[in-house]
């Protein structure tokens, strides 16, 4: 049973960090999945516009390049809350600090950002990839 839980956790983390969603077979799981898909879609639109970008800290943030709508800000916060949940779980499993997991993931997210997207490096400077 513990092995199944570990595998499920690992798959969940990879799916979330890759920008996907995980369908949960529980009552109301479909609504949660639909909301996560909607938030991801809204955030991707803002990333494409350059108003939201990936940070070295492992979270999305406003870039200061244009205005961010309330819907975009809410979606960004929803994605960041999901990331924090995954980071916290992985940190507990690996017996490390949450910010360590977040920073490692932030580096990976920045590395896979598409050309033209805004990313914030460890010094706090925004640049266009």
Image (spheres, rainbow, N blue to C red):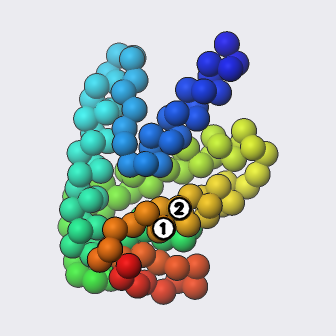
Q: Residue at x 22, y 77 (%)?
A: 67
User: Which image quadrant for residue 92?
Assistant: top right
Mark 1, residues whose alpha carbon is within 10 Å: few (<14), some, or many (≥20)?
few
Please indicate, yes or no, whether residue 121 appears anywhere in the rendered image: yes
Residue pictured at 53% horizontal, 40% vertical: 13
The location of residue 51, given as percent across then percent down, is: 28, 74
Q: Are marks 1 and 2 in contact (CB under 8 Å)?
A: yes
Q: Pointer 1: what residue?
A: 111
Name the side, left or right, on which 65 lies relative to 78. Answer: left
Towards the viewer: 45 or 39: 45
Alpha-carbon distance for marks 1 and 2?
5 Å
Q: Secondary structure at mark 1?
A: helix
Rendered-image quadrant of the C terminus: bottom left
**Tag 2: Cα neighbours inside 10 Å, few (<14), some, or many (≥20)?**
some
Q: Residue at x 27, y 42 (%)?
A: 37
The residue that disc 2 covers is 108
The residue closer to the viewer here, 43 or 75, is 43
Picture layout, residue 107 above or below residue 84: below
**Which quarter of the image is occupied by the N terminus?**
top right
Q: Position of residue 118 (x, y in %)?
A: 36, 77
């Amino acid at each position: 049973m513990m092995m199944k839980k570990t595998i499920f956790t690992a798959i969940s983390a990879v799916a979330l960090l890759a920008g996907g969603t995980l369908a949960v077979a529980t009552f109301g799981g479909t609504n949660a999945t639909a909301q996560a898909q909607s938030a991801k879609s809204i955030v991707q639109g803002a990333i494409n516009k350059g108003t939201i970008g990936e940070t070295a800290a492992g979270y999305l943030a406003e870039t200061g390049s244009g205005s961010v709508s309330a819907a975009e800000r809410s979606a960004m916060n929803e994605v960041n809350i999901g990331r924090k949940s995954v980071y916290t779980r992985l940190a507990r499993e690996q017996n490390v600090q949450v910010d360590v997991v977040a920073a490692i993931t932030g580096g990976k997210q920045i590395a896979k950002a598409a050309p033209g997207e805004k990313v914030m490096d460890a010094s706090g400077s925004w640049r266009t990839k």
